[in-house]
Amino acid sequence: MAVVAQVPTRLGAIRAIPRRFVVAGILALWLLIFAVFRGHQTLALAAADLTGLHRWFNDVNDSIGADRNSNPLFLYFFNEIRLVIDNLVTFIQSLISQPSSGRGVPQIGWLGVVGIVGYLSWALGNVRVALLAMAGFTFFGLQGLWQESMDTLALTLSAVFVSLLIGIPLGVWAGMSDRANRIMTPFLDFMQTMPTFVYLAPLTLFFLIGPASATIATLIYAAPPAIRITAHAIRSVPATTVEAAYSLGSTRRQTLTKVLLPMSKRTVVMGINQTIMAALAMVTIAALIDAPGLGKTVVKALQSLDVGTAFNAGLAIVVMAIVLDRVTTAASERSATGVPSAEGRGRAPGRLGGPFVKWRRHLLVAGGVVAAVLVYLSHTYVWAAEFPGEGSTGSTIASAADTVTTWAQDHLSGMTNALRDAVTNGLLNPFQSLLTDSPWWLVGAVLVAVGAVLGGRRAGVTAGVCVALLVGTGMWSDSMTTLASTAVATVLVMALGVVVGVWMGRSPMADRLIRPTLDAAQVMPPFVYLVPFLALFGATRFTAIVAAVVYAAPVTMKIIADGVRAVPETTVEAAAAAGSNTWQIITKVQLPMSRSALALAVNQGLIYVLSMVVVGGLVGAGALGYDVVAGFSQGELYGKGLAAGLAIVLLGVMFDGITQAAARRTTAVNGRRH
Amino acid sequence: MIPAQTEVSRRRDRSQDPDQDRTPVISVRGLWKVFGPKAEKVPQSEELCGLSRRELMDRAGCTAAVRDVSFDVSPGEVFVVMGLSGSGKSTLVRCLTRLIEPTAGQVVFEGEDIRDADPKRLRELRRHKFSMVFQHFGLLPHRCVVDNVAYGLEIRGMGKAQRTKRALEVVELVGLSGYENSYPDQLSGGMQQRVGLARALAGDPDVLLFDEPFSALDPMIRRDMQNEVIRLHHEVGKTMVFVTHDLSEALKLGDRILIMRDGKTVQCGTGDELVGAPADDYVRDFVKDVPRADVLTLRWIMRPAGPDDDLGGPEFGPDVVVRDATRAVFDAVKPVKVVENGKLLGVVGDEEILAVIAGVEGGA
């Protein structure tokens, strides 16, 4: 969109105008034909209607359900995987969250968990994060969400454990072998491009609903960052160092263990951080397929529009995200400073005093003993096992949130409703009706043509295939509704992203102030965004759009800021020396030179927005998101939900293809010009 | 020494053919390295061999980094490979230990063709016979100086006490005493390269390979390090193959210099041969700015004694550098005689000296 909207500069005009004219022409033609054929061949499908494909999916689901224990593929493969994962999850759950064999309480009670968490945070990180972690975990108990939090933690930990077990070796392999890297990269791309909710439905087909398939879904989402970052870490070890190691006669194994792994340790720990955050986000979303924990509480509350309860549980998710992020970040910082000698580095920044370092080992042993005592107490005594109190803080928070919501709805509704209606009526509705009321072949042709013009022939072909398959899913009309919301959200994301990104890119001060907030926002599981907007705007399409915008904005802002920052200082200086004013520098130098960053930002913005579609379905976004959610909960709509999930993937693949091709083009153009 | 003076290697091996007295340590024959699809086809095809770099890229999609290079390195010699960036010199030196796999040709080391070595034998050679010093050091940032130096010994399986002892000796040899427990990023570039040098020396190899080791260093540090290499060469007497793009470095360190361009050998000879008898315009252009008086010897500027010459002047050997003879030639009333083994080779008078010092072309 941004590419289309850009005013052609005079220099670029000779080459650029034709493409823009073509796009504008296509759009004009669309409007013209739309006026004639409006409302014909729209392929609309009522909420309860099913197509043959959907029924067939239902049948497949039923037959797999019936064959689950006789089909050898299930008997010896899927069921085995499920069994192993299930045992792992059940084991961790029996340790910290669920009553275990013959006991009314888990093996380790709240006091023990708080003790272990504090001790580990201190040993791996520092005292500050240890205090934060202990406070955070105690807070879960006060909220009355201890068991839910521990379920979420148990699922997250098992998913992270398996992710790393698979991800780190694969990452090392991809890091060392070009061929392995070439094979893995497209898979990883696909896994990460695909909106997260989409594989939930097929997974339930193979692994049933419940903790095991939730863990596997989480695994699919959380393992790619671990693989990628490990491979990246291995690859970014300087080639000279590896060459030097080989030149001295190191074997492959020696090079790996003595050079590559030690030198990539720090980055790998950062990868563990990302894996944990991804896992936490996914575990909460996996509530849609009946994963226990905080996510389930939020989903239930959202479905009954109980803002207070949703806010309370959402707050617990945020606290857990903050604790896990801080602790692992501190751990990666320690692993970085821990490498050189204690006297060389540890002393310099005054982080830990000398005597403290000397005593650290003894203190660690003492702390371990204390933690063990706490675990023992919590195993033995009920007061240390079950969190005392009724979780009254939680109900206070919930009712406070309710009060604020009521107040906001009473007092701000004029403003929020005006905003909502302005966007809905001014932007969303016309666009949506243009998309949904046009004949399918017209929109399809427009998509293919725009794809071909912006992204080249291959993007056009991709768009064509995706359009055909979209029609095949029987979800065309709903896809168009979702597409309208997605497009509006992406436009808003880009507008926000350009404004804030340029500001951050130009002012280091702004960057320093804003970036930590963005980092924190990216850590939050996407559910959490919905709650405050639900309170402000009620259950509408607009709420879902705002949540998607807030979810997608940080990443686009960062990409654009980095792009603007990467414009060579001398070029900016030269423009300033030529007498350009600030506006001219931004529009004529900095933005055109960060074209490829802008294209990448559009790509990422779209993908992020699209991945919020299902979450939006929970709060009235309707269309594909609603179909997916309904498919999870109602057996007869299962097939339709699956088809809707597929449609989201197709939209994602199509836009990813077009925007990436467009991004490559702009990069190529930039490359030629300089 | 006057700063402006170009220093020249003092150890001169005048023999045109090193096979005369000693068998070479390394003998390279017809070495090729071609990058690209079906690279092995290129050296076999006479047609493709003849193509220029650009044509080869267009025709076969290949880049020939090293083309049919042959040379010998004598024991104890400092052999310099010189060329501009992209001339293939770094590829060439990597082919010697197969860090880059050669496409065709022979690399014979002490009678054994290295290209025939299996991975185990190759590791043996790398652990005991060759060591390399890299332009960007290639140190392990997570290990202190001693452990970096001991790395090569460690992977051979040497015990900790023994390898630390050896590493400390070498650290002292390269003048890094007191920094044994520092980490690479706490050292300056020059000191880091000393660590690289120490690491190469620790395994007591027969041959040291240097890949532009001082290019990343400041000029002053570079000079220190060059002197360090000269000192070490005197002390340990290793055979060295030294890659550089810096002519003055090549002249200062090299007994013989091989000039490469586009992967091919342009000329191979001693410094005064390159300056005195450049093989083509490329070399001539290269050595144009060298102060000729510092490099050329009397052999290159003498004229045959004519009947008019008064042969009563002082005598000099033919390998005396012009600069060192200038004073004597000017002081003498009669031309200086150039004598080798009692035989009169020619005479040098004021005009010859002046022609060199004034930089007149064709002074040879």
Image (cartoon, rainbow, N blue to C red):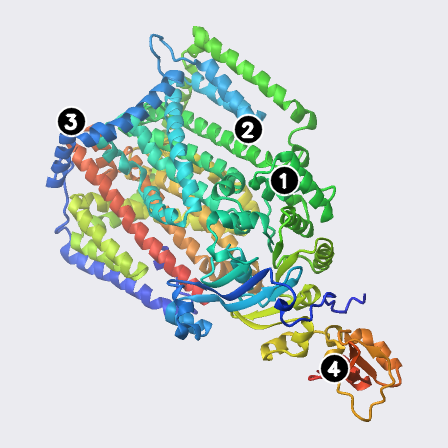
Is B328 displayed left or right of A563 in the figure? right
Residue A184 location, x and y as percent?
35, 45
Q: Nearer the viewer, mark 2 or mark 1?
A: 1
- Where residue B235 sits, quadrant-wise, is bottom right
Q: CA distance from mark 2 to mark 1?
A: 27 Å
Question: What residue is pinned by disc 4?
Answer: B301
User: Front-most of B196 and B107?
Assistant: B107
Residue B147: which disc? 1
Is B342 displayed left or right of B57 in the figure? right
Q: Chain of mark 4?
A: B
Mark before the other along the chain sequence, 1 or 4: 1
Instruction: Describe the element under mark 3 as helix, strand or loop.
Output: loop
Residue A280 location, x and y as percent?
39, 30
Residue type at mark 2: give it: Gly
- Residue A80 seen in render: yes
Residue type at mark 3: give it: Ser
Q: Nearer the viewer, mark 4 or mark 2?
A: 4
Asked if disc 4 and disc 2 are in contact, CB closer than 8 Å, the reply is no
